[in-house]
Amino acid sequence: MRLSLAIWRSLYVCSLIPITFASGPQVNLRSGVFEGLVAGQGTEKFLGIPFAQPPVGSLRFKAPVPINQTFTGVRNATAFGNACVQPPSSSLGAPIGEDCLFLNVWRPENTSTDASLPVLVWFYGGVFNTGAASSEEFDGTILVNRSIEIGKPMIFVSTNYRVNTFGFLASASMAVEDLNNGLQDQSAALRFVQENIAAFGGDPSKVTIWGQSAGAGSVEAHIVYNASAGLFRGAIMDSMTGPFKNSPAPSTYDAPGKPFSLILNTTGCSAGPTAFACLQETPAEPLINFSNARVAATLNNQFWEPTVAPGSFSPVRASEIIAAGDFLHVPMIAGTNLNEGNSFSTSLLGLNLTGSAQDEAFDNFVRATVINQTLITSDVLDQFHTFYPANDPSEGAPFNTGDSLFDRAAAWYGDFMFLSARRRFLDVAASLQPTFVYHFREFIPGNNVTLGVAHASELPLIFGPVPAVAAVEDDLAITWRDFYINFVNDLNPGPAWPQFTNETKQVLQLKRDNITAIPDDFHSVMTDFDNSALVLNEWQK
């Protein structure tokens, strides 16, 4: 067959043009070669890297097992891995599945393997029952790009961990080494970082861990329980929770009407020594449907809580370790927001209750924050009534709504779950290690006024981009990012942020055009009571 002159000319011209095949940046890890992509703004990202074996089959509900294989060829790392099992949400940014132990890495473009950059590892919040590293709000591009701009380049890592029934299944019939698997997943991710981050150009001796809400509680848990000693050198905790809002013994979950008993009823598994194996063998769909329904139906989604048991990840109550000062001594940043409790109290909005009916609703709300509600005594509830009375215009000010039940519950929740937790830990830690504390008081334009300076409202400032409606916050956002980038590099946020000490008790107020040190004396009567042995025992903290 003869080719036409036009075709010959076309082939000749094409032969003069070099043929190239697009490829992304590659890293050679212990588990194989992974190819990522350029994220823009001078940043590369590698997504969906497995850091442990899939927790399915015989590994369901078990502690994470390290990767024991080397993948052949070049493995694609351009899309997020599955989010862990939880109620569906458009914000997750990835499919949902039990095989979910993946992490993601952002680094400056063309980073060499000998760059020895410091590393920031992110744990998401979600009351230990929801959340995913694939959420678009946790993109590390802007943070890494800013670190390049100010001459302090760093690497950002985000990691999944199992949540709800799949991460925090608890029962007296379980082996203690398989309790709190969500927290153990985080430790496994940190070990993977230690073994592999140098391939990305990171320094394994310069790892800082950071989390918000349950993620901050996770960070505190790794400090308090020494389970991840040597895997990080610094810690950042936004809206820390102390480290858990409630930490009952595993047997608590076995009682009638409690989570483990309910899951046995749903699956038909029998209580006792065969229960765990039966749940491992149960088809995924009924387990997922049960867990999702219960999480969605529970106040603030807190169907499961981390548990405390001798020999487990968390062998004793955190408050005991904190009081003794027997935790890892690493430099820390921690803080809370002005209206932490508002978004957790919206179930009480508009009920229009008064008198004894309002007090009863308030008490029921308080009791619902623990797994074993029989522990909450009337003496403690009466004291809460004194601190948070009906129709008090100071509660939640200046963002109080005039809805008495909501305002008093939101004020109680913020003080009890967040502010007191921060003081319980940091007041001890301040004498043992460099400690920097903030109080975020900036209401961001475009946010819901009813929620005020809400829980998690700082995250769009830190991760960016700042919404157009809130462009006035750009300078505050950049300042906050710089504080954290400085800390990751130098273990100090910089001279504008004074160290918190028990002598000065100065915290940094983070507010647009008013970043200044203020005394840490607000709501102290309430938080002193919250941190009393009586109250800590009733919440098993």
Image (tube, rainbow, N blue to C red):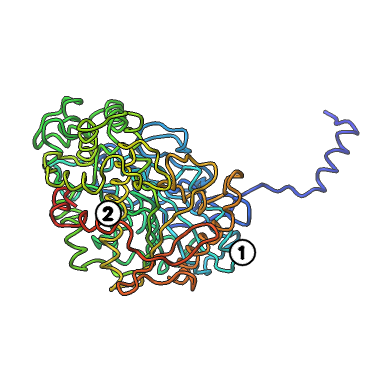
Q: CA separation, marks 2 and 1? A: 34 Å
Location of residue 10 by image quarter = top right
Give the labeled residue for mark 1: 149
Q: Badge 1, how many Cα within 10 Å: few under 14, some, many 20+?
A: few
Give how far across and how far down residue 451 sits, in percent: 42, 41
Q: Which residue is found at the position 43% from the left and 33% from the top?
A: 89
Q: Which amino acid does label 1 sit on?
A: Glu
What is the number of the mark on residue 90? none
Question: Which residue lies under the disc numbered 2?
Answer: 243
Q: Looking at the image, do the residues carrying marks 2 and 1 touch, with CB atoms under 8 Å apart?
A: no
> Which quarter of the rendered picture does the N terminus lie within?
top right
Answer with the quarter of the image where residue 506 lies: bottom left
Horizontal arrangement in the rendering, residue 249 relative to residue 411 (left or right):
left
Residue 358 locus on image (x, y percent): 24, 33
Considering only vertical position in the picture, is 55 above or below 523? above
Asked whether the viewer can see residue 494, the reply is: yes
Residue in view at x 83 percent, y 39 percent: 11
Say what secondary structure mark 1 lies in: helix
Question: Seen from this angle, which residue lies furthest right?
Answer: 5
Amino acid bearing label 2: Pro
Pair 2/1: label in front: 2
The kind of secondary structure element at disc 2 is loop
Image height check: is 365 above or below 30? Answer: above
Drawn side of residue 281 relative to residue 45, left or right: left
**Is 237 in front, or is 230?**
237
Name the N-terminal-most of marks 2 and 1. Answer: 1
Circle 2 crowding by C-alpha within 10 Å: few under 14, some 14–19, many from 20: many
Q: Which residue is drawn at 45% across and 38% down?
A: 92
Q: Is residue 431 left or right of residue 270?
A: right
Classify residue 495 as left or right of residue 427: right
In the rendering, at what x and y percent does residue 508 appear? 43, 64
